[in-house]
Structure formats: structure tokens, C-alpha cells
Amino acid sequence: MDPARTGTSADVPLLSQQNSPTRENNRWMIWRAVFNVSTTIIGAGIMSIPATLKVLGVIPAFILIILVAILVDITVNFMLRATYAGQSTTYAGLMKENFGKTGSLAVQICVMITTLGCLIMYLIIIGDVFSGKGEHLGILQEWFGIHWWNSRYLSILFTVLFVVLPLVLYRRVESLWFSSAVAILLAIVFVGMCIVMAVIAIAKGQIVRPRMPPELNSTTSFFNLFTAIPVIVTAFAFHFNVHPIGIELGKPGAMTTAVKISLVICAAIYFSIGIFGYLLFGDSINADILVNFGKSSGSVAISPILNDVVRLSYALHLMLVFPLLNFSLRANIDELIFPKKEHLATDTKRFMYLTLILLALSYLVAIAIPSIWYIYQFMGSTSNACLAFIFPGAIALRFLQRCPWFIFKERQNHRSGHDCSSCCDEYYCYCCKHLRSDRK
């Protein structure tokens, strides 16, 4: 993969260019990548993690979070090595090298479904914060009462026009690492506040003992377990931003390090908010945990100001994450519809049309769909599953078809069990070298 290549809109780097980076600059660029990757991962995923603990139980949910994080790390590592073994600079390009135009089209469609779904979820959550949902009141309704001007559709519209729109109009996002760092800080503050509130509730004896294993009272409760798995898969999905972020680092090792750090941070945040959010609200936990904060939620007796700070901080977090995912969505749509057009950032008319249409579509769907749980289930079982596991696995199988299997088997027979991972790495490197030689 040539980092200097900028032939399509999907190749625009999310990080600023460095002509002759020193070791300190390399380290700083890795941390910038950590900020962007972590922001892409967390997004709205943190909101529904406590609800998955209610469905799965604490122990199975913890195991599933760790398992999904490990699988994601493996697939991203394979994607990066396969990318640098070839000539592609995008996820779609990687699939095109291995499966032709059909593979590229499949990736682009899945990326568009995933990113658009996430943007819709962000707007739904922002609407929950400001205008509430059902019996739960939003911040504006608690402060000023229920009026037409603080209804759900108007509060989301105001946010889209005056907060989100100025952010997504940036044609390049070199400085997005800073807003990503602020977004991660807000997420950590949100988790910290939840922990403090849960500890206070424990001291007051206001919590219910969490459910460790899942509760299987009927066939319905058994099948509900499978609705929680796509939520966790979606919460760790960020494969669509691996190439835009990683291309700037110049080598797969740096991006691999950034991904590992990000996955550890996000897994810790997910389990922390999951267990303490579950302790705080028990079985009354909502699919969007922000709905549980507020005067009308029946939550533990904590200062209303603290409740409002918790909700507002995460609403601001989502506003800062929005441009990062919008960038990938807009770039993929432009690459799919206008493959031979000039760079999107240089075409003002096309750039504005795509930006406004995507914002309008996100707004309309966010108004029509009441809950993020349905979007999580749909994306986690379709597009995110393909991007995170199926497509990388298909690329791996294609490598196996091009490389003689007996070489791997022969090496494995000469190694002990604890060296199996090293053997796999050597075989993997062989596959990449074989693929490179095929292209020469």
C-alpha cells in the first residue's frame, strides 16, 4: 500500500502529513490514531452495553466483550498485512484485488449501511437527551416544561442545522484527532460519573444484585440472548476507518499498535459502564442508558444537575464523533457513484449535495425510528458482521487457496503447542509474500 496515493476520496487521510517524522512524532501519530480509532469504536456503542448485561448476564457479557475484542484485533491485523502486501489503499480496494468488482461493491454497501446507521443512532440518542422518549423527559422538557419548540423533531433539527452541519462541512479532517481526544475524554468522564453514582447507590443500599448468568425462563428469553450479540459486535465495529486512519502511519505495525491500545481502552470502558450502569438501574435499564438519567426515570436520588451533566456530556461526545463517521460515509458514496470524477474536496457542488442529502436522510430516519436497539440488531447481524468477520475471513481463505497448505502443516508439526501463534504468523507472512510475488 502506497501512503502517498490519493487517487480517490476514500484515500484522504484523517491525520496530518509529516514529511520526516522523528521517533517522538511517530509515537505522537500513533496516539492520534488511538484517539480516532477509539472514538470510532465507542460512538453510540456505549449506550446499549448495560442493556446487554441485563439480557446476557454479567459473566457471559464480559466473556463476549473480550472475545469480540480479540476477534476484531485479529481481523484488523490481517486486513492491514494483506493491504500492505498489495496495492490497495482502501477496504473496498482490498476486496477488489481479491474478489473483483463484486467484492468492492459489497464492502462499499456494508460501509454505507454501517456508517449511516451509526449517524442515525447518534441523532436518536441526541433526541433522547434533549426531548426524552415516552414517559422519560428530556433535559429541555425538565427545564422549561413540555412545549412545541422542545419537541423531539425540532430539537434534533436544531442540532443538525447549528451543530452538526458546520462540523461536517470540513473537507479535510487533519485536526480531527483533537476533537476525537475531547470525545474520548467526555466518554471517560461519563463512565466516571456513572461509577460514582453507582458507588453512592451501593452505599445507600439502593441497588439490586446483578444477574450473573442469563435468566432463561422461557423460549422467548432464550432467543433474546441472540439479540444482544449483534449489539456488542456493532459496538466494536470500526473496520471502515482502518484504512483512512492507518494509511497515514506508513506501516502496519504502527496501526496494529494503535488498534490494540484502542481495543483495550474501549473494552475497559464498555465493561465499566456495563456493570456500573446495570448496578445503578437494574432491570429497568433502557436500550439507551441516557434515557434512565433524569427526574422521571425513577433512578437513584442523585443531584439533578449531575444527571444533566452526564447526559449533556455524552450528547456532546456524539456530536464530535459525527463528522468522523460522516467522512467515511460521504467518501464511500462518492467513490461508488462518481468513481471517475475529480477529488470530492475540490468539487464544491458535489460535496455540498452529498453532505446535505446525507444529513437530511439521517434526520428523517432518526425521527421515524424510536429506538437504537433495532438499529443495533440490524447492523450487528448484517453489515457489521460482514465488515468485521466475514470479509476478512474471505480474504484469508483466498490466501489459503493461493498458498500450499502443506507448508503450514509441516511447520506446525515441528513446533510445540505454545508456539502455534508464532507458526501462524510465519505462515501468514508466507501468504503475503506469495501474494506479492503473484502480482509482480
Image: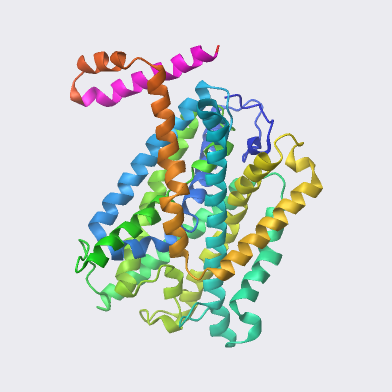
- 349 up-or-down from 49: above or below: above
Residue at 52% of width from left, 45% of height from top?
110
- 8 up-or-down from 424: above or below: below
Residue at 38% of width from left, 35% of height from top?
74
Residue 178 colored magenta? no
Q: Residue 138: horizontal and vertical position, in percent?
A: 53, 78
Q: Residue 410: horizontal and vertical position, in percent?
A: 25, 13
Residue at 22% of width from left, 62% of height from top?
214
Viewer can see residue 260 = no
Furthest-front residue in this view: 102
Q: Quadrant of the C terminus?
A: top right
Q: Which residues are magenta?
A: 418-439
Q: Nearer the viewer, residue 357 or 298?
A: 357
Q: Nearer the viewer, residue 24 or 96?
A: 96
Residue 433 colored magenta? yes
Q: Nearer the viewer, residue 10 or 102?
A: 102
Q: Quadrant of the N terminus?
A: top right
Viewer can see residue 51 = yes
Q: Residue 437: horizontal and vertical position, in percent?
A: 49, 12
Residue at 52% of width from left, 51% of height from top?
114
Q: Residue 366: name its quadrant.
A: bottom right
**Image check: 80 left or right of 222?**
right
* Scheme of colours in the image: rainbow
Secondary structure that dominates the magenta span: helix
Q: Residue 209: horizontal and vertical position, in percent?
A: 22, 71
**Image check: 178 left or right of 171?**
left
Number of marks in picture: 0
